[in-house]
Image (cartoon, coloured by chain):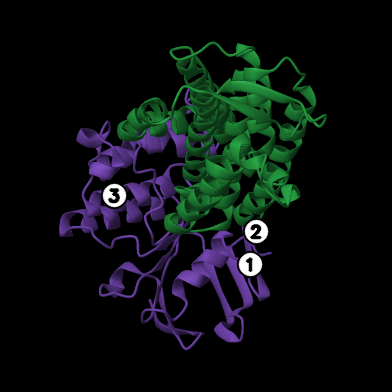
Chain colours: A purple, B green
Amino acid sequence: MNNEYILEVRHISKSFGKHLVLKDITFKIRRGEIIGISGENGVGKSTLLKILSGFLPPTKGEFTVQGRIGFCPQELLIFETLTVRENFIYFAAAYGLDQKKATPSWERTKGELIEQFRFRCYEDTLASYLSGGTKQKLNLSLALLHSPDLFILDEPYSGFDWETYLHFWRYAEELRARGKSFLVVSHFIHDHSKFDSIFQLKEGVLQCVSTI
Amino acid sequence: MRLNYIKTGLVMTAKEVLRNRIALILFLLIPSLFNTLIVLTTKDRPITLHLASIPDGTFFKVSERNETLVFIALAAAGFIAAFLGLNLIQKHIGVDRRLVLCGYRPSELIIAKLTLLLFVILLIGGYVTSSLLFFFQPRHFFQVFLGFILGGYIYGCYGLLVGTIFKRELEGILCIILLGNIDVGWLQNPLYYAASQNKAIIRALPAFFPSQTSMVAAFTDHSMSQLFMGGIVYGGTLLATGLLIYWWKMRIKK
């Protein structure tokens, strides 16, 4: 595998019964790249991300990742009856980030996320009491907690207000400058300047529609 | 097995359960309500009882009210444990899978849940056994407690199994209520069992071992150790099946 690429996807297909959702998907992501995948509802964007994150096995094909993945699913997969802080602690434990032996990077990432997504005043609030947009911020933050090398984000900014959306992209740019890569899936990609390449998924086939 | 992972999982799961205050109140109210209904509706008259686990045809004279109190206490422990088992597995199966993706092992998550379930079963068992003392003194208090624990364990494992099979709450609740009602709420009652046909079917239902254990302990001096072990094996089979399905649902392609 070439070290230049953090993700290499080779000929991935996925079918559910007789229904072929993804057909021979092949692409690569370099370190520090932000890639977007758009497409209509139900074309298989989330299925592709679920395969890349390990949630689903592909029917055919393979992919290789060099480094850690941070996956933000489209649906809110957070603990509603835990506070924001407790959600962070639970997922930090899952990532192996021990609270008592907090490393500088874990502390820094947590501090960054709290500042970037303005969680300070919600830290002790139960997730069930948060607004839809704030829940989505928490959903996203849980994927960023362990400073992954590749962010796989499924509709990461749905429900965000404009200011949070801008915050998200500012933070993404900071992370990109540190060599982190992004694969962002959204049915609504309106700002092409944020991405190095944009692909469109149509009838199971991935086509590059824009490259800078 | 990483103990700090299990500890975090246990603490977080316990916090979630403790925050469900209405459910906690119901856990306390349901057994008391059941007892009150029995005391108000069942006569304190002597009845002759035959227990399925004592094969020599021995009959016992017991108070109808006391017999029903033991039976209904077991039903309360079983129902509460089953619903908790269902809730612990079903409510967060998606988030649990995300945790597995992030680094948890399914075994660590399930051990945390089972530890909490067992702890609650012990509390409920203690509560329902103690509540019997307001009405009568069972012959062997601790063994009756073990019978209720066994009922909670088997029905907790059943709830867990149902939670792994069904995605939605309604199906799970129906499965628990339907089986619970007919088994721990009716067929296992010695009053019915003595005159029933096809007894093998009743013996194969989940509440057979716990109901016999608690009845034997409450009203006779016979040994209940074989019944208790039978119940452990029965619950273990349900648990193993549930764990297998849980593990299959949690699997992640690394």
Residue beneath label 3, please? A135
Which label is found at residue B253? 2
Dot 3 surroundings within 10 Å: few (below 14), some, or many (20 or more)?
many
| Residue A48 numbered tag | none
Q: Residue at position x 73%, y 14% from top?
A: B221
In this orientation, which residue lies closer to the viewer: B191 or B176?
A: B191
Give how far across and how far down residue B243 sits, in percent. Answer: 66, 46
Q: Indicate the amino acid at tag 3.
A: Lys
Residue A17, x across and y down, in percent: 61, 81
Q: Secondary structure at mark 1?
A: loop
In the visual, does B99 lie left or right of A88?
A: right
Cα–Cα span, label 2 and label 3: 27 Å
Query: SS of the residue at dot 3?
Result: helix
Residue A57 is marked as 1
Which amino acid type corresponds to the residue marked 2 in the rendered image? Lys
Are the residues flagged by discs 2 and 1 in contact, CB closer than 8 Å? yes
Q: CA distance from mark 2 to mark 1?
A: 6 Å
Residue placed furthest toward the bottom: A203
Chain under label 2? B
Q: Are marks 2 and 3 in contact (CB under 8 Å)?
A: no
Give above or below for A138 relative to B215. below
